[in-house]
Image (cartoon, grey):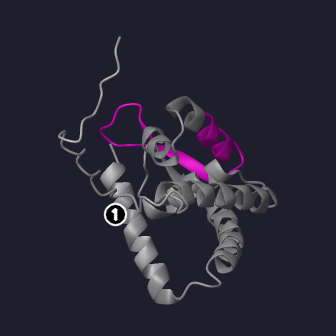
Amino acid sequence: MTDRVISPADPPDPPDPPDPAGPTDPLTPRVSYLVFRLERYIRSRLDEALTRHGVTTTEYMALSELRLRDGPSSADLARIAFVTPQAMSLVIRDLERRGLIRRDPQPGAGRMLRARLTRKGLSTLRRCDRSVDEIEAVMFAEVDDTARKTLAESLTACARALRP
Protein backbone atom coordinates (compact mmCIF):
# COMPACT_ATOMS: atom_id res chain seq x y z
CA MET A 1 0.00 0.00 0.00
CA THR A 2 1.34 3.42 -0.88
CA ASP A 3 0.68 6.64 0.94
CA ARG A 4 -1.09 9.31 -1.04
CA VAL A 5 0.98 12.41 -1.46
CA ILE A 6 -0.99 15.61 -1.08
CA SER A 7 -0.03 18.26 -3.55
CA PRO A 8 -0.63 21.97 -3.11
CA ALA A 9 -3.20 21.72 -5.92
CA ASP A 10 -5.46 19.39 -3.86
CA PRO A 11 -8.44 21.17 -2.33
CA PRO A 12 -8.38 21.51 1.45
CA ASP A 13 -10.58 19.28 3.55
CA PRO A 14 -13.96 20.83 4.26
CA PRO A 15 -14.32 22.28 7.75
CA ASP A 16 -15.96 20.10 10.37
CA PRO A 17 -19.63 20.90 10.88
CA PRO A 18 -20.45 22.71 14.11
CA ASP A 19 -20.97 20.37 17.04
CA PRO A 20 -24.57 20.74 18.28
CA ALA A 21 -23.57 19.34 21.69
CA GLY A 22 -21.15 22.13 22.45
CA PRO A 23 -17.90 23.82 21.59
CA THR A 24 -15.16 21.91 19.82
CA ASP A 25 -12.58 23.19 22.29
CA PRO A 26 -11.12 19.99 23.77
CA LEU A 27 -10.70 21.76 27.11
CA THR A 28 -14.44 22.45 27.41
CA PRO A 29 -16.39 19.48 28.78
CA ARG A 30 -19.23 18.20 26.63
CA VAL A 31 -22.71 18.84 27.98
CA SER A 32 -23.51 15.12 27.92
CA TYR A 33 -20.45 14.47 30.09
CA LEU A 34 -21.50 17.17 32.58
CA VAL A 35 -25.03 15.74 32.75
CA PHE A 36 -23.61 12.26 33.35
CA ARG A 37 -21.35 13.51 36.16
CA LEU A 38 -24.22 15.42 37.74
CA GLU A 39 -26.44 12.34 37.56
CA ARG A 40 -23.77 10.28 39.35
CA TYR A 41 -23.40 12.91 42.10
CA ILE A 42 -27.17 13.15 42.54
CA ARG A 43 -27.57 9.37 42.57
CA SER A 44 -24.91 9.01 45.25
CA ARG A 45 -26.58 11.63 47.44
CA LEU A 46 -30.05 10.15 46.83
CA ASP A 47 -28.90 6.64 47.70
CA GLU A 48 -27.40 7.90 50.96
CA ALA A 49 -30.36 10.10 51.96
CA LEU A 50 -33.14 7.70 50.99
CA THR A 51 -31.53 4.77 52.79
CA ARG A 52 -32.18 6.67 56.05
CA HIS A 53 -35.90 6.41 55.21
CA GLY A 54 -35.66 2.72 54.34
CA VAL A 55 -36.22 3.39 50.63
CA THR A 56 -33.99 2.77 47.59
CA THR A 57 -33.68 5.31 44.80
CA THR A 58 -35.66 3.03 42.46
CA GLU A 59 -38.40 2.67 45.09
CA TYR A 60 -38.48 6.45 45.50
CA MET A 61 -38.87 6.88 41.73
CA ALA A 62 -41.73 4.36 41.71
CA LEU A 63 -43.47 6.02 44.67
CA SER A 64 -43.04 9.46 43.07
CA GLU A 65 -44.58 8.25 39.81
CA LEU A 66 -47.49 6.68 41.68
CA ARG A 67 -48.19 10.09 43.18
CA LEU A 68 -48.14 11.71 39.72
CA ARG A 69 -50.02 9.07 37.70
CA ASP A 70 -53.23 7.23 38.33
CA GLY A 71 -52.30 3.57 38.74
CA PRO A 72 -49.51 2.95 36.25
CA SER A 73 -48.71 -0.67 35.52
CA SER A 74 -45.52 -2.32 36.69
CA ALA A 75 -44.27 -2.23 33.08
CA ASP A 76 -44.93 1.54 32.92
CA LEU A 77 -42.96 2.05 36.13
CA ALA A 78 -40.09 -0.08 34.81
CA ARG A 79 -39.77 2.10 31.70
CA ILE A 80 -39.83 5.28 33.77
CA ALA A 81 -37.23 4.00 36.25
CA PHE A 82 -34.94 2.50 33.56
CA VAL A 83 -35.09 -1.00 35.05
CA THR A 84 -36.30 -4.28 33.62
CA PRO A 85 -39.92 -5.30 34.15
CA GLN A 86 -38.63 -8.21 36.26
CA ALA A 87 -36.67 -5.85 38.52
CA MET A 88 -39.67 -3.52 38.88
CA SER A 89 -41.87 -6.49 39.72
CA LEU A 90 -39.61 -7.17 42.70
CA VAL A 91 -39.68 -3.49 43.71
CA ILE A 92 -43.48 -3.42 43.52
CA ARG A 93 -43.77 -6.67 45.46
CA ASP A 94 -41.52 -5.28 48.22
CA LEU A 95 -43.35 -1.93 48.39
CA GLU A 96 -46.67 -3.79 48.65
CA ARG A 97 -45.34 -6.16 51.33
CA ARG A 98 -44.19 -3.14 53.39
CA GLY A 99 -47.62 -1.49 53.03
CA LEU A 100 -46.38 1.48 50.97
CA ILE A 101 -48.56 0.65 47.98
CA ARG A 102 -51.56 -1.51 47.16
CA ARG A 103 -52.43 -3.16 43.89
CA ASP A 104 -55.97 -3.30 42.61
CA PRO A 105 -57.44 -5.09 39.59
CA GLN A 106 -57.96 -2.85 36.59
CA PRO A 107 -61.56 -3.19 35.34
CA GLY A 108 -61.61 -4.70 31.87
CA ALA A 109 -57.86 -5.37 31.86
CA GLY A 110 -57.85 -9.05 32.76
CA ARG A 111 -55.27 -9.91 35.39
CA MET A 112 -53.48 -6.54 35.20
CA LEU A 113 -53.04 -4.87 38.58
CA ARG A 114 -52.62 -1.13 39.02
CA ALA A 115 -50.42 0.12 41.86
CA ARG A 116 -51.52 2.97 44.12
CA LEU A 117 -49.93 4.71 47.10
CA THR A 118 -51.22 3.91 50.56
CA ARG A 119 -51.39 6.49 53.35
CA LYS A 120 -48.16 5.00 54.74
CA GLY A 121 -46.55 5.21 51.29
CA LEU A 122 -47.51 8.87 50.92
CA SER A 123 -46.11 9.65 54.38
CA THR A 124 -42.83 7.89 53.53
CA LEU A 125 -42.68 9.68 50.19
CA ARG A 126 -43.10 13.08 51.87
CA ARG A 127 -40.20 12.36 54.24
CA CYS A 128 -38.07 11.33 51.26
CA ASP A 129 -39.11 14.49 49.40
CA ARG A 130 -37.75 16.62 52.24
CA SER A 131 -34.37 14.89 51.90
CA VAL A 132 -34.42 15.42 48.12
CA ASP A 133 -35.30 19.09 48.72
CA GLU A 134 -32.18 19.40 50.88
CA ILE A 135 -30.01 17.87 48.15
CA GLU A 136 -31.49 20.24 45.55
CA ALA A 137 -31.01 23.24 47.85
CA VAL A 138 -27.28 22.49 47.98
CA MET A 139 -27.13 21.78 44.24
CA PHE A 140 -28.91 25.02 43.29
CA ALA A 141 -27.36 27.28 45.95
CA GLU A 142 -25.52 29.30 43.30
CA VAL A 143 -28.21 29.10 40.59
CA ASP A 144 -30.94 31.75 40.40
CA ASP A 145 -34.61 30.88 39.85
CA THR A 146 -34.58 31.94 36.19
CA ALA A 147 -31.57 29.76 35.38
CA ARG A 148 -33.08 26.87 37.34
CA LYS A 149 -36.34 27.11 35.37
CA THR A 150 -34.44 27.32 32.08
CA LEU A 151 -32.33 24.32 33.05
CA ALA A 152 -35.42 22.27 33.91
CA GLU A 153 -37.07 23.19 30.59
CA SER A 154 -33.89 22.45 28.62
CA LEU A 155 -33.31 19.08 30.29
CA THR A 156 -36.94 18.14 29.71
CA ALA A 157 -36.61 19.01 26.00
CA CYS A 158 -33.37 17.01 25.73
CA ALA A 159 -34.92 13.97 27.43
CA ARG A 160 -37.98 14.21 25.16
CA ALA A 161 -35.74 14.33 22.08
CA LEU A 162 -33.90 11.16 23.08
CA ARG A 163 -36.92 9.20 24.31
CA PRO A 164 -37.53 6.11 22.17
> From what the image shows, is residue 88 above or below residue 126?
above
- Where is residue 118, by image quadrant? bottom right
Left or right: residue 150 versus residue 93 is left
Place of residue 82 in the rendered image (x, y in percent of width and height, measured from the top left): 51, 43
Residue at 82% of width from left, 60% of height from top? 52
Place of residue 83 in the rendered image (x, y in percent of width and height, measured from the top left): 54, 38
Q: Residues within 10 Å of mark 1 (few under 14, many from 20)?
A: few
- Magenta segment includes 19: no
- Give the SS element for disc 1: helix
> From what the image shows, is residue 127 above or below residue 121?
below
Residue beneath label 1, please? Answer: 157
Residue at 44% of width from left, 38% of height from top? 75
Left or right: residue 81 versus residue 22 is right
Looking at the rendering, the stretch of residues picked out in magenta corresponds to 90-113
Left or right: residue 29 versus residue 91 is left
Place of residue 81 in the rendered image (x, y in percent of width and height, measured from the top left): 52, 47
Residue at 66% of width from left, 52% of height from top? 57
| Observer-nearest of 162 and 14 | 14
| Observer-nearest of 138 and 73 | 138
Residue at the right extreme, as displayed? 52
Q: Is residue 117 visible?
A: no
Pick the quarter of the image with the C terminus. top left
| Observer-nearest of 140 and 74 | 140
Pick the quarter of the image with the N terminus. top left
Left or right: residue 92 versus residue 51 is left
> From what the image shows, is residue 122 above or below residue 15?
below
Residue at the front extreme, as displayed? 8
| Observer-nearest of 99 and 91 | 91
- Magenta segment includes 98: yes
Place of residue 41 in the rendered image (x, y in percent of width and height, measured from the top left): 68, 59
